[in-house]
Amino acid sequence: MKLSLMTVRNFKNINEDGVEIRIDNIVLLIGPNNCGKSTILDAYEAFASSGKALPISSFHNEEGSNEIEIEATFNEVTAEDLEKLGNDWKFDHDELGGCIRLKWVWPGPDQKAKKFSWNPSDTAWQEGGMGGWDSLIASRVPFPLRIKPTDPPDEREKQIVAILSEAVKESVKSDSTQVAGILEEISKLADSVSETVQDKIDETCELVMGRLSDVFDGHTVKLEKAIGKLEPEKIIGSGSHLRIAKGDHAPLPLSVQGTGLQRAFLWSALSALADSGHVKRGTKRLGADTMKILLIDEPESFLHPPAVRDARESLYKIAELASWQVIASTHSPVFVDVSKPHTTIVRVNSTQDEQVRTFQTESAQFSQDEREALKMIRLCHPTVNEFFFAEHVILVEGDTEMAVFQKLAEDSVHEAAKRIHVVNCLGKGNIPTFGKILNQFGTGYVAVHDSDSPRCRRGDGTARNGAWSVNASIRETVDRRSAELPESFTLVHVPDFEEYYFQESVNSDKPFNALRKLASGDFSNELDTLLDQILDGNHPCFYSSSQELSDRVVSYVEESVTDAERGLWVIDQ
């Protein structure tokens, strides 16, 4: 079964009102520092512990009377799950399909939690319930693998060596006759046993290296053995360590490698080894088909920018595996890729008064063309997804508007100017796609665009102008926005940005020319107040319907368009 929804109450900095998190193949938790992103990762670890006692520091405001509740809903429930847990607990969720729901409640510090199961027949929580023994529940709940940026290098290495050691023990124990022969030749013990297990070591290291190469290409992995006592199952003994080599360079211990490589190696190794069946839950080995969740804080930490992009792809690849989910907290917009399917972005806020914002790529129902456009935009502007981190967003068509708005924001004394984020949509046609994302995520925005002419020149005549038809799409996107969300607006320049403010049409070096005019003061006074008027909500170019936009265009034609050009401004009814 697969985690699909989690609710946390009275846990650390999360109060009794709680936080509800939608879970997908990969979830990216974003938000300001100290807002509770890592707390959500901690909460799932506590949930998966089968109610293990928690210290006073885990209780909200460190008050033991604040009972902690961590509730999880699972979908994709299999017949094997129901065989273990019982058929009576499954119910149909409107969005998620067949589900079961379970929660743990911690009555106080240093006390084991109580298990509650959602009984669909009574539509109420029932103490105990599904699975009987807690160990049965634990065997079905996705297993958490946690990686923190504060983990010391030696602890990272110990985790990997311990897993590798398990693989070797199994290989040695499977052939006791051969081992007995080796023990008779004590003088040759180290070499003989090493040769016996070397294939398994090489095979496992190859698995790890395959994942690591997604982030750090050209590195090889080698386990440097230090022989301990003369016990076959302890052939990888105290002092064993990992060495990594790049190209033809000599292999060096993992502990002296860069912090970024160490962290990437750890999650690469854990995912590869878990898939090969070498990670255990207690005394039971996790199978390749056992559901697992990689919980990782700030995967971008200590990585060079190109490696950040590679690390992003590596995590998304792990999330694509059938038995894996990923929950990561991040401050990097590079890690956000809304073109990927089954991706959820959750903005966690620093106060519980602010609603948690969620965006799910499946709910957006992007067309294939929209997905391709988002990929291209991300390739051209790797940090474009920074708008997920912003409070106020302005969507613009291209580089000229982007440059002007950024300059105006720098110079503005308006209180809100420093909190806006301008998104270059790389074309008017992409504005509705970004509007669709922000409608779901809940952030307010202003879509700034040109009206363009209804028709364009084609050969000796005219034809419908595709850019004109986008006007209706932009307005319709804003109109579809939920009334419960912060209001969003549309603003149109007739006929376009450059002519409206500079009284001329610019065809080349548009951003440079716009900034040059801005710096020289050679522009309409209206441009100087553009940003402040948008922030105050009183810009004269705001419009609230497609008809209002058409009326503006008609007025412009009557006042400014020559007879020779009027054929381009005929609006089809």
Image (spheres, rainbow, N blue to C red):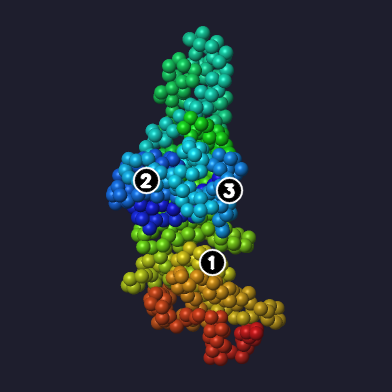
Q: Nearer the viewer, mark 3 or mark 2?
A: 2
In contact (CB < 8 Å): disc 3 and disc 2: no
- The residue positioned farthest toward the front in the image shown: 122
Q: Can you tell which quarter of the image residue 454 is in?
A: bottom right
Residue occupying image coordinates x 55% and y 10%? 181
321 over 524 or under it: above or below: above
Secondary element type, mark 1: helix
Q: Nearer the viewer, mark 3 or mark 1?
A: 3
In contact (CB < 8 Å): disc 3 and disc 1: no
Quarter of the picture containing the C terminus is bottom right
Q: Residue 460 at what x, y percent from top left?
A: 71, 81
The numbered mark, 3 or 2, whose residue comes first in the sequence reads 3
Q: Is residue 424 left or right of residue 531?
A: right
Q: Nearer the viewer, residue 4 or 529?
A: 4
Identified by mark 1, the residue type is Lys
Q: Nearer the viewer, residue 568 or 106?
A: 106
According to the picture, the residue beneath numbered tag 2 turns out to be 106
Identified by mark 2, the residue type is Trp
Q: Nearer the viewer, residue 532 or 178?
A: 178
The numbered mark, 3 or 1, whose residue comes first in the sequence reads 3
According to the picture, the residue beneath numbered tag 3 turns out to be 76
Secondary element type, mark 3: loop
Identified by mark 3, the residue type is Glu
Quarter of the picture containing the N terminus is top right
Q: Which mark is residue 436?
A: 1
340 over 146 or under it: above or below: below
